[in-house]
Amino acid sequence: MSVDTHQAPARLPDEELLTLDAHWRAANYLSVGQIYLMANPLLTEPLRPEHIKPRLLGHWGTSPGLNLVHTHLNRVIKARDLDALCIWGPGHGGPAVLANSWLEGSYTETYPDITRDAAGMARLFRQFSFPGGVPSHVAPETPGSVHEGGELGYSLSHAYGAALDNPDLLVACVIGDGEAETGPLAASWHSNKFLDPVNDGAVLPILHLNGYKIANPAVLARIPADELDALLRGYGHDPLHVTGDDPAAVHRAMAEAMDTALDRIAALRRAAREEGVTDRPRWPLIVLRTPKGWTGPAEADGLPVEGTWRSHQVPLPAVRDNPDHLRQLEEWMRSYRPEELFDEHGAPRPEVLDCVPGGARRLGSTPHANGGLLLRELPLPPLERYAVEVDKPGASTHEPTRVLGDMLEDVMRATAERRDFRLVGPDETASNRLQAVYGASGKAWQACTLPVDEHLDRHGRVMEILSEHTCQGWLEGYLLTGRHGLFSCYEAFAHLVDSMVNQHIKWLRVTRRLPWRAPIASLNYLLTSHVWRQDHNGFSHQDPGFVDHILNKSPEVVRVYLPPDANTLLSVADHVLRSRDYVNVVVAGKQPCFDWLSMEQARVHCARGAGIWDWAGTEDGSRAPDVVLACAGDVPTQEVLAAAQLLRRHLPHLAVRVVNVVDIARLLPREEHPHGMSDFEYDGLFTPDRPVIFAYHGYPWLIHRLAYRRTGHPHLHVRGYKEIGTTTTPFDMVVRNDLDRYRLVMDVIDRVPGLAVRAAGVRQRMADARERHHTWIREHGTDLPEVADWTWNG
């Protein structure tokens, strides 16, 4: 359907049109003022250079369109008493969202010093993109926001995540035409195939095409209208088109499109919820075409501005120094007729606020944008129900993630009625051994099904799509609106969301400093199918570097755990699912793994984060150990214990200490990370002067970076993944990267003073074993029997 602004139905009464236009003009005025002014907010005197900010920052081009959307959302929210949230994809249009928040009063309620009068307006203007002020983007500081939009591509997936399990919520999502060109946004159009019209809310995408990005035309704004319409219909939407540059005509057309879209949404919900219709809905979508920089300067310095890329940021860049620009700015701001919009004290006049809803219905006050207010404790079952029996270390094996799957099934079951827990992942739930969850919930799916399909469920809460970006966006939107979840992913491909998690970490770091932001459930990753057991898929699937990326980020937000067996994974999972305002990365294998610790021991060890495994070493406490064998990760732990067993056999008089690290941040100094150890603790665990051979799951230089300030760092030798991989046997992966048990024994001999001569024969046997391994796998295609059948007998 196209709503032509030249032939739009005159359903909007003239009086309502005037109040909508007044609100829109007020928001535009406030948006311009934030970009330019630091004084004289109501233009009660002629503009002078000293009223202008010394540095002009911000984005005008998208702001008029965002103000239009906000104004019309206000109208329908108030008229229909809607519970609504808006995701502002062009988040760099911060002036618009701040302006509307100030107009509706939610900004003053959040920040009482920014009053709704001339003094408060002056503070609103001055603080924008100013030292000690607020960012130019729709940031965590902005009431009503859950999406910054600094990095484009994630608005639509965030919107769908917010709508999941929120059956009465309308989530409007403004998508900028630049953002619409990104890969993550393109994939997220498919989210409508997962939205359950019975249990989920509705998403209303508003594709705002103003023609240009920073310097280039926008693709979707330049393709023929019928081609764009066909594209959006192909995605499964029912588009409504609003196009124009005459404000009155656009207001009428936008009101008509909003009413039509919401009527359709109501009808689709009614059909699914009351009439039992199971066909996948074709949800409405609005395509809004208005000029970039609409109502701004038509030209500057003889060049066109409005409707071009030149209006993207600051249309008049030299206002302090250029009298013509200063004159144009004053004419521009006075064109909104501020004396009609604000009274003599600077407060918005009643007619300006006539369309604004009240209380929590205001977009800046919705609790869905402050999800911690809605968050409930997750009903986690007792871990003893799933714990594996460990009579003695290494006597049995389990697949850690399969054990975790049993626990997650019960979490799914316990949240079946309240629907506030989701498991997301890129088509890998069963591959990652978590398929037990299907006993409590199937996989969300609204498209057609075939007889061979398994576990597809219109009302399912397991989310699978082969787009890590979409999974991440869904989960972020879900968490930010007050729910819980877990993202399961192959370790190597977590990198696809490096940038997205970076944005989320920044968001969390800022919200921790905002007392009005209630804590939300942590973003939890389970990285499995990891580097050491991707021997079948090969080099392309072997990358443990996501941990390095995470540990570069804000220490108060990020946590990384490497549980070495099933019970420690259960303990870590229980901890991260209870936590708030963190990004937790848990790396755990899905292949059979030795059980080292009982549930009670696992709890104590995980709480400690790093500790000595007395039963694995040979020190007797009468003196310092000769060497420390440290490990982090399931495969490195096994190799360290195998090395310790070899040392026990071949060098029985050597005092060996075995240290296992679950919480990698423990290696950092306490002043650098809340989980870090003091130097006293670190030296007591690793010794200040004895060789430490550290077998690490990932890239070895990370451990050096974390521990470089420690007294014993010159004695620290780390083995890990060195970017040497291929399709081979499991043990060959560790041999190729010098992480194997034989190499670790050789490292001990090379680094403990006096052993090089006394243990030369042992070292030679270890080197021979590695050669024997190479010959064996090339002949038999399997690992040496002494490796494949190895058990711990310490």
Image (cartoon, rainbow, N blue to C red):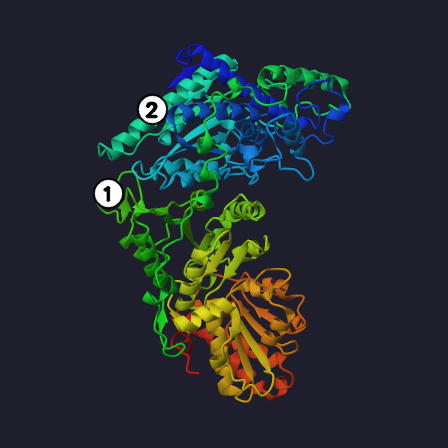
Q: Is residue 194 visible?
A: yes
Q: Quadrant of residue 170?
A: top left
For label 2, the residue is: 263
For label 1, the residue is: 450
> Is 661 above or below relative to 759?
above
How far apart are the alpha carbons under marks 1 and 2?
32 Å
> Is 349 above or below relative to 709?
above
**Front disc: 1 or 2:** 2
Disc 2 residue crowd, few under 14, some 14–19, many 20+, Cα 10 Å? few
Disc 1 residue crowd, few under 14, some 14–19, many 20+, Cα 10 Å? few
67 and 293: which is toward the camera: 67
- Dot 1 amino acid type: Leu
- In the rendered image, the quadrant that contains the C terminus is bottom left
Q: Quadrant of residue 325?
A: top right
Estimate the x, y position of residue 595 in percent, counting from the top left: 39, 72
Q: Is residue 731 visible?
A: no
> Is 204 above or below relative to 490?
above
- Dot 2 amino acid type: Asp
**Could you tell me which residue is drawn at 73 percent across and 19 percent down?**
47
Element marked by disc 2: helix
406 and 48: which is toward the camera: 48
The residue at the far front in this view is 345
